[in-house]
Image: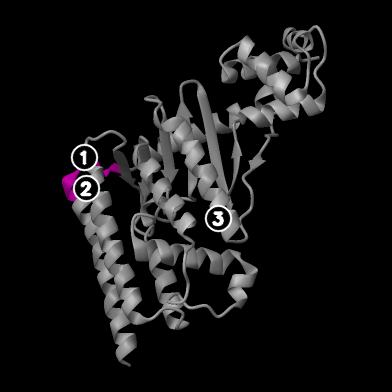
């Protein structure tokens, strides 16, 4: 029989920073005596299931790290579902915490296979931030969907707006690699057209959002060629359509986030799954163009997106005049 208790405490000792710290936490969280806590750590007495789950939860350790599952099985954990504005706030909070944990680690790499433009960029701009949150709630919140609230009448709670901005700022400090394609911008533009045609957003505000999209793309392009801390490596790959998966690797740990519902993700630390994904990701990057290293390719790529935004603006103006 595998010694799962030993594996668990090896992880907890690493996370807690040492045996004394872990004992103090066990005394506080599990109401154990000092001697009993040491006996659990040494393996001289068995830890209960509830104790193991409580400690793993406290340190944010996934229990799939302590066992080797069957070759065709993997343990997936789920980030909480998002159904309303309160869930969205929790999502921002957890995303900020997770990014803050890794941003100061020089070895960390955050790789985003972008089917859609990563949400972090939207949050820098007032109208664009408001529009994306409006669109998310229309897609995720049954009550909000049923209400005929226009974009103009919609207001983001100030605390949500501040957390959205902070999320963008924290991501800006992370060493990130993103893989885009020529269609990465399409979902955003289609959403603007859709809500404009429903008359949920007026032409003036739709055009303002388009102006902010152009400004956002300009900022991203500047980040691609900068060499500052947390600068962006942007790849173009038009052979595959990405799926908004996120792969994080640092030190000896790897983590994979797989989307299943708009902003909701499954994640796993399973070594086989992460290893296999890493191999496929390296192949994707080999078949992609690093835009910071190719001025011509970068100009062509961004010019196509700028042109697409201008086409949408003309479409909006034509629709307004008809």
Q: Check disc 2: other Cα within 10 Å, few if <14, some if 14-19, many if 20+.
A: few
Predominant secondary structure in magenta?
Answer: helix
Q: Residue at x 77, y 15 (%)?
A: 2
According to the picture, the residue beneath numbered tag 1 turns out to be 226
Q: Secondary structure at mark 2?
A: helix
- Which circle, 1 or 3, is nearer the viewer? 3
Colouring used for the render: one colour
Q: Is residue 292 magenta?
A: yes
For disc 3, the neighbor class at 10 Å (few under 14, some 14 to 19, many from 20) is many
- Earlier-in-chain disc, 1 versus 3: 3
In this rendering, position of residue 255 left or right of residue 168: right
Specify whether residue 284 is in view: yes
Q: Which residues are magenta?
A: 289-297
Magenta stretch encompasses residue 69: no
At horizontal 52% and vertical 35% (from top left) the residue drawn is 277
Residue at left offset 80%, top offset 18%: 47
């Amino acid at each position: 029989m595998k010694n799962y208790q030993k594996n668990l405490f090896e992880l907890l000792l690493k996370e807690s920073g040492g045996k004394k710290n872990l004992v103090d936490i066990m005394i506080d969280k599990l109401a154990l005596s000092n001697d009993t806590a040491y006996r659990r750590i040494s393996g001289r007495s068995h830890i209960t299931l509830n104790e193991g789950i409580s400690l793993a939860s406290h340190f944010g350790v996934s229990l799939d790290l302590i066992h080797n599952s069957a070759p065709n099985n993997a343990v997936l954990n789920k980030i909480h579902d998002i159904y309303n504005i309160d869930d969205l706030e929790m999502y921002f909070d957890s995303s900020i915490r997770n990014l803050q944990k890794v941003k100061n680690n020089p070895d960390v790499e955050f790789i985003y296979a972008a089917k859609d433009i990563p949400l972090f960029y939207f949050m820098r701009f007032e109208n664009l931030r408001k529009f994306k949150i409006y669109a998310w709630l229309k897609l995720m919140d049954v009550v909000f969907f049923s209400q005929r609230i226009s974009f103009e009448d919609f207001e983001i709670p100030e605390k949500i707006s501040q957390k959205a901005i902070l999320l963008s700022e924290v991501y800006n400090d992370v060493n990130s690699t993103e893989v885009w394609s020529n269609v990465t911008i399409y979902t955003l533009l289609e959403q603007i057209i859709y809500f404009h045609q429903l008359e949920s957003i007026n032409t003036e505000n739709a055009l303002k959002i388009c102006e902010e999209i152009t400004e956002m793309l300009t900022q991203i392009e500047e980040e691609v060629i900068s060499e500052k801390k947390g600068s962006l490596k942007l790849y173009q790959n038009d052979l595959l359509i990405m799926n908004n998966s996120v792969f994080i690797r640092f030190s000896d740990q790897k983590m994979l986030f797989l989307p299943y519902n708009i902003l909701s993700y499954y994640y796993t630390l399973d070594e086989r799954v992460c290893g296999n994904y890493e191999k496929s990701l390296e192949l994707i990057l080999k078949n992609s163009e690093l835009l910071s290293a190719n001025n011509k390719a970068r100009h062509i790529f961004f010019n196509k997106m700028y042109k697409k935004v201008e086409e949408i603006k003309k479409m909006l103006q034509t629709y307004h005049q008809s």
